[in-house]
Image: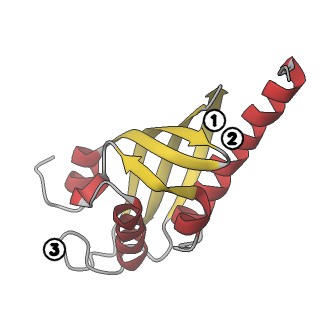
Amino acid sequence: MTTTRQDTAHSIEQNKNIVREFIDGLFSRGDLGVIDTYLAEDFVNHDPPFGVSADREGMRAAGAMMRAGFPDWHSEVHQLVAEGDIVVERFTASGTQRGEVMGVAPTGRAVSLPGINIFRLRDGQIVERWGRLDDLGLLRQLGLAPA
């Protein structure tokens, strides 16, 4: 069986939709169930945020932490670029701190967190993530690092 250009384009669009639905579900709606739907059981997070573990449960913990600290947390996808089994996302996430985050009591401050994620997919699920977030910028906004 040969793969046509149309099949490849279709699977690339499917991969982008999977990433979009995962990001929207976890970070904009706070639905921790999307972890089980969109992350493979052998998922590896090569750059786990906020000191969480590098597996699915670590990603679930990161999502829960952000939702608890920022009930209005949402992620705006600026761009999705895909090739083969790789999808790159450029985004800005933001919210208002209403709960404790990383030991910081609620401040009522609005914060934003720009970043880039690279996802590798297999059989309709995300199997790997690499990412860079503006961690220092977030720490500054929370008052944990000097401006």
Looking at the image, is mark 3 or mark 2 nearer the viewer? 2
The residue depicted at 17 percent of the width and 61 percent of the height is 143
Q: Marks 3 and 2, how far apart in space? A: 35 Å
| Circle 2: residue type | Lys
Q: Marks 1 and 2, how far apart in space? A: 7 Å
Q: Is residue 29 left or right of residue 48?
A: right
Q: Name the residue under label 2.
A: 16
Contact, CB < 8 Å: mark 3 with mark 2? no
| Circle 1: residue type | Leu
Residue count near mark 2 (Cα–Cα under 10 Å), binned few <14, some 14–19, many ≥20: many
Q: Nearer the viewer, residue 144 or 62?
A: 62
Q: Quadrant of residue 103?
A: bottom left
Q: Mark 1 points at which residue?
A: 80
Q: Mark 3 points at which residue?
A: 103
The residue depicted at 77 percent of the width and 35 percent of the height is 11
Give coordinates of residue 104: x percent, y percent: 18, 73
**Sequence-first disc among 1 and 3:** 1
Contact, CB < 8 Å: mark 1 with mark 2? yes
Any part of residue 54 in sight: yes
